[in-house]
Image (cartoon, rainbow, N blue to C red):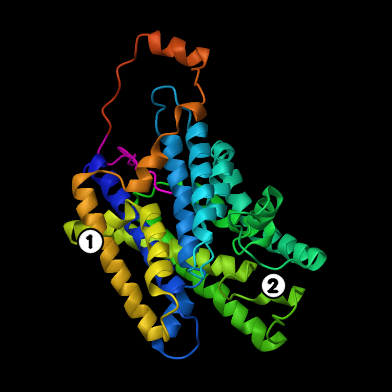
Amino acid sequence: MVSTQARGLTRLYALDVARAVAVFGMIIVNVGPYTTEGWASWIIRALNGRASILFVILAGIGVTFLARRSLTKGITRRSTLLWRGLLLLALGLGLQALDHDVNVILPVYAALFFLAAFVVKMPTRWLFWSAMASTFLGPIIWILARQQTKFHIDPAELGDSPFEIVAAIVVSGPYPLLVWIAPFFLGVWLGRQPLGSIRVQRRLMIGGLIAGFGAFGLSRILIAFLGHPDMSTVGWDRLISAVGHSQMPLWLISSCGTAVAVLGMLLLVVPKLNQRIRLLVAVGQMPLTAYTAHLLIIALIVRPGPATPEMGVLVSCLIMLGLIAFAVVWVANLRYGPLEMVLRRPPRMLQVPYRMPERHRRREHAKPYPRRRKLESAPDEDPDPVVNP
């Protein structure tokens, strides 16, 4: 029988592989080009709006793991989350200024970390229903905002006023927080589930496939009866769309479903592969570094190409191989990626002093009761969860 610690480690490896898959999917989409001709274009369109959703769901799971960790050296979880949000915001605004023709997801990622400082204390049931409510209410509010303000979808970047940055992150950017908070809530909720259970893993895979293909199929049926939404205007007919980054409920359900299915499948498969998948584990342990590096490569080397989707997929594969080689060498010598090292500990000026509640201090000085030995079949806990952005 596999020990509790071993199951916890394999679960972490599965999450690392999932992060690598999400980053690789975004690389293929960002390199492009986005056309409708050929087999390569089908791959790019299939990943569009799905790899990034998986990235956000994994962020929610990582935040949940961080909330489980004990406080160290008087630093609160809230100060750690706020520091990560500040760093991601600055990095995202800076990367957006590069000539890569990509909408950088990091600013909304930063906003999610700011919210996580308060979301981690929400009851599990509230997290689930918050995810469901924001799946439907977020797109409706987004449509109303588009109709009332007539804004153009532009990402925030360095040089914008604070109001423009906040407006782009919350509602007018390519990743509006009003909509993208739904997969984040889902990720935080998933992080509280017994992901080491085979039954839960199978439910995630099967339920995710049903939701993913079911929502997409429902959209196609509605379009067949009601006609294709008019994309030149922002009307209520958009609610039937499941196109990537449409910000609509059916797209959210479909993309979250496929992301959950991929996660469930990896949780089932990765423990059986063991050493064979360590290359992807290395990339997944430094997702922020890999994401930042691919944008630099696109801006400095790839653009203005590639000319065809087939060439784009080839270029994407070369970028992935380069990131794998770098990650393997780096992890062999250091535990965390370059940017992940900066994320782990806030500077002294941002550290919020933590004062242990009186009841906890009394408990520390009390004589401990003898603890029962944990059975190997008990639900696994993360031995040392690595939180990646």
146 in the magenta segment: no
- Residue at 64% across / 68% down in the picture? 248
**Left or right of residue 208: residue 126:** right
**Left or right of residue 368: residue 295:** right
Up/down of 138 relative to 127, above or below: below
Q: Quadrant for residue 202, please give it.
A: bottom left
Up/down of 113 relative to 97, above or below: above
Residue farthest to the bottom? 37
**Left or right of residue 281: residue 150:** right
Residue type, numbered disc 2: Leu
Residue 13 in view: yes
382 in the magenta segment: yes
Front-most of residues 37 and 227: 37
Front-most of residues 353 and 273: 353
Residue farthest to the right? 148
Q: Residues within 10 Å of mark 1 (few under 14, many from 20)?
A: few
Per the image, label 1 sits on a secondary structure element best described as: helix
- Residue at 59% across / 61% down in the picture? 175
Q: Main secondary structure of the magenta part?
A: loop
Label 1, on which residue?
A: 325
Label 2, on which residue?
A: 239
- Picture coordinates of residue 48, whole percent (x, y): 49, 73
Per the image, label 2 sits on a secondary structure element best described as: helix
- Residue at 46% across / 69% down in the picture? 209
The segment highlighted magenta reads: 375-389
Q: Quadrant for residue 229, please give it.
A: bottom right
